[in-house]
Amino acid sequence: MRTDSRSSKRSNASALRIAALAAIPIVLGSIPMSLFERMPKLCVLRRMGIPCWGCGMTRAVASASRGDLGAAWRYNTLSVIVVPILGSLWWRLISRDIDGR
């Protein structure tokens, strides 16, 4: 009986994690880009006039989650590397929970 309770709690937690992970691209894709445009640019390097490889990455990932890869490229050219890596990590986390590991 005790094992069933643990198993049930574990499967509930796994289902919750899967739902939360699945919601990430949906939520990110539903945030209006105008909101991202209005957000202040907080990069210290950019404020000092030093080029920053990370600037625009949030906007690039949000654009990619909408399927707008051209905009993602314009926001940050490194998004062609970062977005697939993030997608792969995201899928690994989901598949790990689905497989029960």
Image (spheres, rainbow, N blue to C red):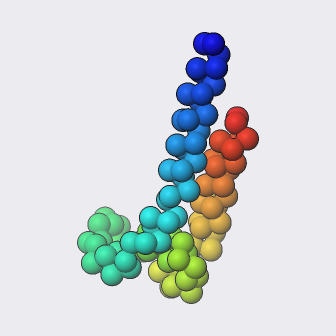
In the rendered image, the quadrant that contains the N terminus is: top right
Relative to 43, residue 98 above or below: above
Along the line of sight, the residue nearer the viewer: 77 or 22:
22
Relative to 15, residue 46 above or below: below
Measuring from the top left, give residue 36's x and y in whole percent: 34, 75
Q: Is residue 73 left or right of residue 59?
A: right
Query: Outermost residue toward the top?
Result: 2
Q: Is residue 48 visible?
A: no
In the rendered image, the quadrant that contains the C terminus is: top right
Measuring from the top left, give residue 25's x and y in whole percent: 52, 64
Badge count: 0
Q: Is residue 5 left or right of residue 50?
A: right
Measuring from the top left, give residue 42's x and y in whole percent: 29, 66
Relative to 20, residue 76 above or below: below
Measuring from the top left, give residue 79's x and y in whole percent: 57, 72
Q: Which quadrant of the structure image shows residue 96? A: top right
Q: Is residue 23 left or right of residue 94?
A: left
Along the line of sight, the residue nearer the viewer: 34 or 2:
2
Q: Residue at x 45, y 67 (%)?
A: 28
Query: Outermost residue toward the right?
Result: 99
